[in-house]
Amino acid sequence: MQKNETLLEPSFQAKRFPLSYNQRSIWLQHCLAPDSVINHISQAIHLQNEIDGSKFQRALQKTVDRQPGLRTTFPVVNGQPMQMVHRHQPIHFQHEDSSGWDDDFLHKRMAEEANR
């Protein structure tokens, strides 16, 4: 599979659908507190062994490419929130060597990333 190639058929177009009741409540929470990270899932992991960062990133991207819920955004169309499933949604992946960090600095960096 080539870079940025997904598992979807070539004719795939982003599709819009109405929100479910649960999605509507999450959207409303976001409207009331747009800077809140309450519905964001951010995870930093500490690996004891070396890994190939580019291979790991590609594996994560393939997971997103296979799961429509991970490629869904929520635009407002004609005043109404909609869910839009995209053909491709690039992931944000950041690799940092933390081998020289103490526990306090590691936890501080993890909290910064989780709340940005």
Image (tube, rainbow, N blue to C red):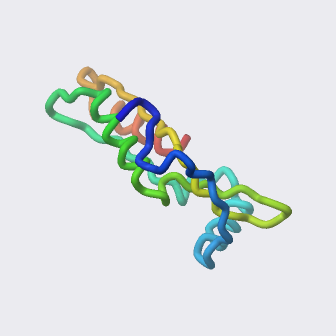
Name the residue rendered at 28%, 31% in the picture. Answer: 55
Name the residue rendered at 15%, 34% in the picture. Answer: 48
Task: Looking at the picture, tell me which residue is in the foreground, 88 or 113.
Answer: 88
Q: Quadrant of residue 46?
A: top left
Task: Looking at the picture, tell me which residue is in the foreground, 63 or 51.
Answer: 63
Q: Is residue 49 above or below residue 83?
A: above
Which residue extends farthest right?
Answer: 78
Whether residue 6 sits left or right of residue 16 in the image: it is left
Q: Quadrant of residue 84?
A: bottom right
Look at the image and tell me in which quarter the C terminus lies. top right
Name the residue rendered at 36%, 30% in the picture. Answer: 105
How many numbered marks, from 0 up? 0
Q: Quadrant of residue 99?
A: top left
Which residue extends farthest top?
Answer: 100
Whether residue 49 sits left or right of residue 56 in the image: it is left
Give the x, y percent position of residue 1. 35, 35
Q: Is residue 1 above or below residue 71?
A: above
Give the x, y percent position of residue 91. 47, 39
Give the x, y percent position of residue 62. 36, 44
Which residue extends farthest bottom?
Answer: 21
Q: Is residue 114 above or below residue 38?
A: above
Q: Is residue 44 above or below residue 71?
A: above
Name the residue rendered at 48%, 58% in the picture. Answer: 68
